[in-house]
Amino acid sequence: MNKNVFKRLLQEAGFNKKQFAEHLGIAQQTVNCWGTTQNIPYWVESWLDNYIKAKQFDDMVESLRPYLKRG
C-alpha cells in the first residue's frame, strides 16, 4: 500500500494519524513514519478496509433500527 492509499483509507475510516495511533494503542510517531521513513505494515490496509466495512454495516443497522419489531 502506498502513502496515498493510506491517506484515503484513513479519511474513509474517519481517522487522522493521531486518532488511528490512539485507536491501535501505538505511538503517533510510528504512524507518522509510515510511508516516509518506514514501510506501511502489510496488515494496515486490510485492517482499515474491515473497519470501514464494519462502520458502514453499523450505520446501516442503526438506520433500520426504527423499523425493527420489538418483542
Image: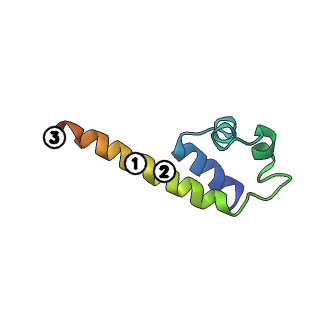
Cβ atoms at labels 1 and 3 below 8 Å apart: no
> Where is residue 53 drawn, in percent x and y?
44, 54
Return the residue at label 3. Answer: 67
Residue 3 in which image quadrant: bottom right
Sequence-earlier tag: 2 or 3: 2
> Where is residue 31 drawn, in percent x and y?
75, 45
59 sits left or right of 27 in the view: left
The amino acid at mark 2 is Ile
Q: Secondary structure at mark 3?
A: helix
Cβ atoms at labels 1 and 2 below 8 Å apart: yes
Residue at the (65%, 53%) spot, across then down: 6
Camera-side residue of 45 and 7: 45
Give the Cα separation between the discs numbered 1 and 2.
6 Å
The amino acid at mark 3 is Tyr
Q: Residues within 10 Å of mark 2 (few under 14, many from 20)?
A: some
Residue at the (58%, 56%) spot, across then down: 47
